[in-house]
Amino acid sequence: MHRTELDEMQVQKRNMVGNQAFMLLFYLLLIDIGLNGFGFRWLQYPMNVFVNMLGCRTYYLIRIIWNNSYVGPRTKTKNIGRQIGLVVGLASFVAGTAAYLEKDSLRIPLSTGDNGAMILFVFSIVLFIVLAIVSVITKWQAKNDE
C-alpha cells in the first residue's frame, strides 16, 4: 500500500472528523457573530475568524492523528530525514529571499491597542505543545500495539 493511501476505515474516520470540525467552525463563527452583535468583541475582525479557524484546524489534526487517519501505512523510512532537511532548507531559502527583498519596506507598525498578535502567539505555542503531546501518545500507542 502506498504511504498516502488510506484504507476505508481511515477514510471514514477522516471524513467524520472533518465534518465535525466544519460544524464546530460554523457554530463558533455564529457564536462570534452573535456576541459581536451584543457588543462583546474579544478580537478585531480578521483575527477572531483566524483564531476560530486555527482552533478548528487543530481539533481536526489532533483527532485524525489520534484515530491514525493522518497518513497510510509506511513502506520505507530511510529517506525521511533527507526529505525533512530538504523542506526545511527550501522554506529557509524562501523566507530569507522574501526578507531580503522586503528589507526596506519592513517598518514597526504603530500600536493599535489590539492584543490579537499576543493572543495568536500564545494560542499557537499552546497548540504546538498539544500537537507534540498527541504525537508522542500516538507513537507510544503504536509501539505498544506492536
Image (tube, grey):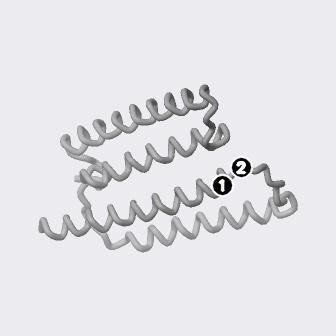
Residue 55 is tagged as none
- Left or right: residue 65 versus residue 126 is left
**Observer-nearest of 59 and 3:** 59
Q: Quadrant of residue 136?
A: bottom left
Q: Quadrant of residue 40?
A: top right
> Which residue occupies 39% across, 60% down?
131
**Observer-nearest of 114 and 140:** 114
> Which residue occupies 38% across, 38% down?
21
Residue 1 on image: x %, y %:
22, 53
Residue 15 on image: x %, y %:
30, 37
Q: Which residue is mark 2?
A: 114
* Marks 2,1: beta carbons within 8 A: yes
**Observer-nearest of 142 and 53:** 53
Q: Is residue 110 visible?
A: yes
Element at label 2: loop
Assess disc 2: are there few (<14), some (14-19) or many (≥20) residues with their C-alpha within 10 Å of its C-alpha.
few
- Left or right: residue 77 versus residue 57 is left
**Observer-nearest of 116 and 9:** 116
> Which residue occupies 54% across, 33% down?
32
Residue 8 on image: x %, y %:
19, 40
Residue 146 on image: x %, y %:
12, 68
State how far apart marks 2 and 1 are (Cα). 8 Å
Residue 117 is tagged as 1
Residue type at the position of mark 2: Asp
